[in-house]
Image: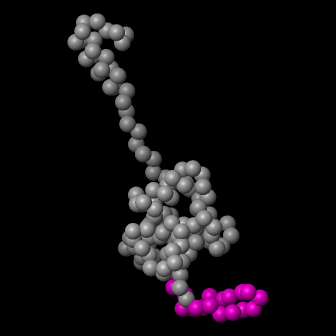
Amino acid sequence: MEVVKENRATGELDHPDSSIISLKNVSHIIRNIFWDGDHVVGKIEILPTISGNILKALIENNVQVGVSSRGMGSLKPMGEGMMEVQDDFELLCWDLVSIPSTPNTYMKLSEGKQQPTKDYSKISGIVTEIICNATGVCPLC
């Protein structure tokens, strides 16, 4: 939560090969994280970066985007291909990916900023007034 409050909870579009969050590849920032029962829920803001603009275009075109944690730590073999994450695990960030490692962890759009619409209704009247007054004849009426 400290990282969220300090506006440092950024993530990337896709998991990079590095554990370092590359600011030039950041697509979003987490604005809030909270528990909803047994689920961690977060609110993100898509940033106007190159990766953020790609993310925005994907979402606007109904592409499902997964949420996946990125972290570092040691693993303990548990048998049958199972590994247990150890106490030294450090959560680095939440990236947005095509296929999340945890099933059904896809982003859900619950609210979004709407761009204000511009009101051009008065322009038509002004143009009509200018043309009609200048010529004395009103071809627009």
Above-or-below relation of 110 to 77: above
Residue 42 visible: no
Residue 62 visible: yes
Q: Please identify the quadrant where the N terminus is shown.
A: bottom left
Left or right: 104, with 50 as reference point:
right
Residue at image x 62%, y 88%?
Answer: 85
Taking depth in this image into account, of 133 and 121 the one nearest to the observer is 133
Taking depth in this image into account, of 37 and 122 the one nearest to the observer is 122
What's the magenta region? 74-91
Residue situated furthest right in the rendering: 80
Above-or-below relation of 122 to 102: above
Where residue 49 appears, x then y in whole percent? Answer: 40, 60
Q: Please identify the quadrant where the C terminus is shown.
A: top left
Dominant SS in magenta: strand
Left or right: 28, with 81 as reference point:
left
Residue 22, image quadrant: bottom left
Above-or-below relation of 74 to 38: below
Total marks in image: 0
Q: Is residue 75 magenta?
A: yes
Residue situated furthest top in the rendering: 137
Where residue 34 appears, x then y in whole percent? Answer: 53, 71
Above-or-below relation of 50 to 127: below
Residue situated furthest left in the rendering: 134
Left or right: 18, with 131 as reference point:
right
Residue at image x 61%, y 58%?
Answer: 64
Residue at image x 77%, y 88%?
Answer: 80
Where residue 17 appears, x then y in whole percent? Answer: 52, 78
Residue 139, image quadrant: top left
Residue 82, image quadrant: bottom right
Q: Is residue 85 magenta?
A: yes
Residue situated furthest front in the rendering: 17
